[in-house]
Amino acid sequence: MSSIDKHGPFAEETRLIHAGRAPALFGGAVNIPPFRASTVLFQTLADLDAHDPALRMVRYGRTGNPSSHAFEAAITELEEGHDAVSFASGLQAITSSLLAFTRQGDHVLIADTAYAPTRGFANGILSRSGITVEYFDPGIGAGITALLRPTTRVVFLESPGSLTFEVQDVPAICAAVTAANPDIVLMIDNTWAAGLLFKPLKHGVHVSIQSATKYVGGHSDASLGVAVCMRQDHWLRLKKAAIELGACASADDLFLGLRGLRSLQVRLRRHHESGIKVARWLEARPEVTRVRHPALPDCPGHALWVRDFTGACGLFAFEIAPVPRPALAAMVDGMHHFGMGYSWGGFESLILPSNPAAIRTATPWAGGELIRLHIGLEDADDLIADLDAGFARLNAALEAK
Ligand SMILES: *Cc1c(COP(=O)(O)O)cnc(C)c1O
């Protein structure tokens, strides 16, 4: 089935406006109202007895309802996959996917640049369940075959890494792994691309996961995750796992996810443009030793980004030489437009000093002080002025020593 058959001949911008909507079923309302129901009543015993091998009936709020079905249909359209399962958070989508496809004795390979809480789960519950977890260099490419074992069940990618932004050769990794063992399930955390800027399911990935808390929601007020599968058997397995785990998303957050999706394209275009403008300005700063933005040549895997992605979001990082903590505080405590906080993908800009050395294991961190930025929808020149003033405070603090 070609993606054009399933997803229609229209441009992606057009398809995302219609995806998951059904005004005729909801009194003509443009948006599907949040389906707030736990109990679902059956009219007859025959209805109660009806089996649902496709697991798509509305039988109880937690196991699937019009809000979750609409959101899953829309994200499936976005990722050009077969079907999706929604979750209460991106992390729940990741942990449920890893649990769904592994059992005691299995071996799982995870990119060294994976989101830190993904590693937390892998090193915690997954390892305690008798699954061997191994991290690999994100630049490994087809060389991943050297790490495969007879027990390898899952290879988990994240490209670019959401802290240090190495872009992986996803097509090469997928081709090599599948040629070696077609039963291995390839998963990716596709949050940076928001399901839009990169289409992993076209490159051999089986399960594309994203935190819809980030760009899909887009307004820093929802918690939502989703995993899109390329194969029906994978979808069924993941859906069964979600039911066993009691994993589900709230109707209100699903509503916000669907609403955010409608403006995803235009927001991302703006994040892309402003992000690159700020990144280029940072590149020319004497304080900055390296800018880690996939669209800039200095970023590991930049050529892969050019080849595989259609754009960039607003999240990237830069490095400065190590500085005393109080000098760093002088810079980041006084920001006017940049808030200091985790998460990203909302309309507002964020700044976050981070230490990758504490997280990775396969590829030791050799960089300097890392500062991650999320470039929001503000005017880019206002953001540059804010950073400029921040560097002035940093330099004054260093000179005052
Ligand atoms: C935030 C994030 C997640 C987890 O998403 P939540 O919705 O906060 O659980 C997963 N992966 C990446 C890359 C993220 O940035």
Image: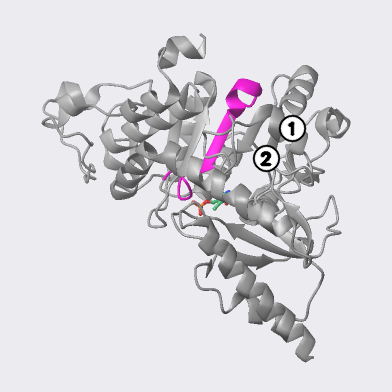
Sequence-first disc among 1 and 2: 2
Residue 91 makes an appearance in the image: yes
Specify the segment rendered in magenta.
Answer: 199-216
Residue reaching furthest to the bottom: 400
Residue at 65% from the left image edge and 50% from the top image edge: 162
The residue nearer to you, when weighing 170 against 396, is 396
Is residue 307 found left or right of 343 in the rendered image?
right
Q: Which residue is mark 2?
A: 159
Is residue 381 found left or right of 113 in the rendered image?
left
Q: Which residue is mark 1?
A: 304
Tag 1: residue type? Leu
Number of numbered discs present?
2
Residue 119 makes an appearance in the image: no
The residue nearer to you, when weighing 367 against 48, is 367
From the top left corner, tell me how far across and down residue 196 is, in percent: 52, 33
Beta carbon of the mark 2 residue lies under 8 A of ligand 1: no
Q: Relative to 313, is 120 above or below?
A: below
Q: State the SS at label 2.
A: loop
